[in-house]
Amino acid sequence: MATPKILVLPGSTRSGSHNVRLAALAAKELALIDIDVTRISLEDYPLPLFDGDLEADNGLPANALKLKQMITAHHGVFITSPEYSASVTPMLKNAIDWISRVRERGEPTYAAFKRRAFAIASASPGRSGGLRSLMALRQILELGCGALVIPEQVAIPQADQAFDDLDNIADTGTADLLRAQLARLVDMARLMM
Ligand SMILES: Cc1cc2nc3c(=O)[nH]c(=O)nc-3n(C[C@H](O)[C@H](O)[C@H](O)COP(=O)(O)O)c2cc1C
C-alpha cells in the first residue's frame, strides 16, 4: 500500500511548549507506523504580520511560499495549537493567512488547503485542554480555507502534567485517542494520493 506523507506543525515555538511536545509525540507515533513524516517549526519561517498594503507593495514573503510548498508536498497535515484567549495563536493564524494568499501558476485560491487532509489537536495547562482553540482552528481551516478537517480531534488538559518522562501521554485513554486520530488522518491522506 502506498505511504502518504504527513506534515506536523505546532502552533507554538515557545521553549518548553506543550504543543511542540505533542507535535513531537505525533511525529514519533507516525514514524512507528512507517509513515513518511516531516515536523517543522514556524520559528524557521518568520513572517511579518499580514498587512494588505505590505502585500500590495512587496508581494508575498518568501516564507509564505515556502510554507505553502511544504504543505502541498504532503498528503496530510497535523496541527497542534495552544489556546490563546479562546482561539489559536496569532503566529499560527498569521501563517495561515499568508499561506492562503499564495497562488502559483494560476492555481485556485486556498490551493494549499485543498486535496489533502488535516487533523487538529491542542494542549493546555487548563482543564479544557484548549478545546475552544480547536473550534476556532476548525472554523479557520474548514470555513475560511475550504480544508477537509477530520472529525477526530484531541485536546490534552493539564498538559504540564500530562506527559511522562519519555514524553508519552501518561493517560492511556488519551494516548489511544491520539493514535486513533493519527490512524484516521493517515487513512484520509492515503485517499488524497
Ligand atoms: C495570551 C495568552 C492567552 C491564553 N489564553 C488561554 C486560553 O484561553 N485558554 C487556555 O486554556 N490557556 C490559555 N493560555 C495558556 C496557554 O494555553 C499556555 O500558556 C500554553 O502552555 C501555551 O502553549 P505552549 O505550551 O504550546 O506554548 C493563554 C496564554 C497566553 C500567553
Image (spheres, grey):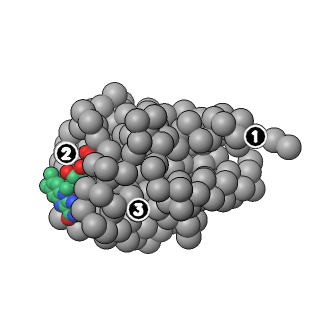
The residue where tag 2 is placed is: 49
Classify mark 2: helix, strand or loop: loop
Amino acid carrying label 2: it is: Leu
The residue where tag 3 is placed is: 155
Query: On screen, 162 above or below 138?
Result: above
Amino acid carrying label 3: it is: Ala
Whether the residue carrying mark 1 lies under 8 Å from ligand 1 is answered with no
Residue at point 47% right, 68% down?
A: 142
Instruction: Tell me the mark number nearer the camera, choosing from 1 and 2.
Output: 1
The residue where tag 1 is placed is: 3
Query: On screen, 165 above or below 88?
Result: above
Residue at point 63% right, 35% down?
A: 31
Classify mark 1: helix, strand or loop: loop
Contact flag, marks 1 and 2 (Cβ < 8 Å): no
Picture quadrant of residue 33: top right
Q: Sequence order check: which comes first, mark 1 or mark 2?
A: 1
Residue 83 appears in the rendering: no
Q: Sequence order check: which comes first, mark 3 or mark 1?
A: 1
Q: CA distance from mark 3 to mark 1?
A: 27 Å
